[in-house]
Image (cartoon, grey):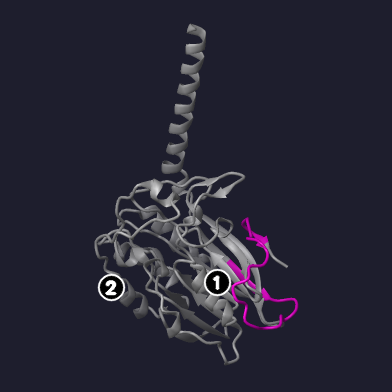
Amino acid sequence: MSKLFRRLAHGALGALGLGVATIGYAALIERRHWTLRTATLPVLPPGSPNLRVLHVSDLHMLPGQRAKQRWVAELAGLAPDLVVNTGDNLAHPKAVPAVLRALDPLLATPGVFVFGSNDYYGPTPKNPMRYLRRRRGSWVKGTALPWRDLRAAMLEHGWLDATHRRLRLEVAGQPVAVAGVDDPHLRRDRYNKVAGPVTEAVTLRLGLTHSPEPRVLDSFAADDYDLVMAGHTHGGQLRVPGFGALVTNCGLDRSRARGASRWGVHSWLHVSAGLGTSPYAPVRFACPPEASLLTLVPRAVEPTRGRAGGARVGRAVSSAAADIS
C-alpha cells in the first residue's frame, strides 16, 4: 500500500508541476511572444497588381505595455499598402495614448477601422468556464472607455471609420470599396445600413467586422464582397495541439478561429488571433498573439458571381507563410 501511495503521490505532484509550468508558460512567455503571420489570398481580379494589407486587432492595450507598443510600431517597416484595424484596442480608461504610441508609425499609411466591445467598455472579471457554455447569457458591461478620443485621433491622421459606412479609397493606386458594421458581439451591427452589392468598378470589395458572426459574414458574402476581415476570437486563446481552438466566443466554428478560409462561393474570411488578452485572463497557449500581413493577389480564373447564401467551402489556412492557389 505504501508503494502504491508513493506512486500516486508522485504522479499527482508531477501533474501539478506540469500544470504550474504550463500556466507559467502561457502567462509569462507565450502571451508576450508577438508573431507576424503571413498569407497570400487570391481575391483580386485577374491582371491586378498585388496589394499588401496589414491586419491588426485586439490589442487590449494597457498603459504600461511598452514592449507591445514597440513591437506594433515596428510593423510599419513592412511597408503595407493598407492597414486594417478590427477593434478591441483598449483595456483601460487611460490606454488611448498607449494605443496611439503603438500605431503612430502606421497612421501615415492608409487605414480603415471598426471598433469592438472592448473599445466601448472595459474588461470585467469572468468565470473562464462561462466561455465553454453554448449559452453564455447576457454580456456584462464594464467601465465606459474613451473610444471617441481614439476615433478622433485616428480620423485626424487620415484613417477612415468604416462603421456602418460604405467607403471608396485609393490603395496603391487601386480603387477599393470598404464597408463595415459595428460590433455584432454587442448586437450593434446594422447591416441594412451598408447592404447591397458594390456597383462601381473596384479592385477589391472589403468587409469589416469585429466579431465574425455568421449572420454578418453571410450578408457580406451575399453582396459579393471579396474579403471580410475580423478579430475577436483571439484564435481561441487556449488551443490544444492536434485539436485546435476550444471556443471562438461567437457563432463561428472552431476551425475558423484564426487565419483565412473560404466563406461562400466567392468570399474569403480572415480572422486575426489578435495581439492581446483581457487583463483578467492574461494567458495564451499554442496560440501566440499576432498581427497578419496579407498579400492579396489575382485569382487564377474570375468566378461566376452570385448570391452565396453563406455556403462554406474549403478549410482554414493553418500556418504562417501559407500560399493559396
Q: Is residue 30 magenta?
A: no
Residue 80 visible in this rendered orientation of the protein = no
- Front residue of this view, candidates 233 and 312: 312
Residue 135 visible in this rendered orientation of the protein = yes
Question: Left or right: 319 with respect to 179?
Answer: right
| Residue at 47% across, 12% down | 5
Q: Is residue 72 above or below residue 184?
A: above
CA gap, disc 2 and disc 1: 25 Å
- Where is residue 53 drawn, in percent x and y? 55, 71
| Residue at 43% across, 32% down | 20
Q: Which residue is mark 1?
A: 53
Q: Amino acid at mark 2?
A: Asp
Q: Which residue is mark 2?
A: 149
Main SS class of the magenta portion in the image: loop
Residue 70 quadrant: bottom left
- Where is residue 148 drawn, in percent x and y? 28, 74
Magenta span of residues: 294-322
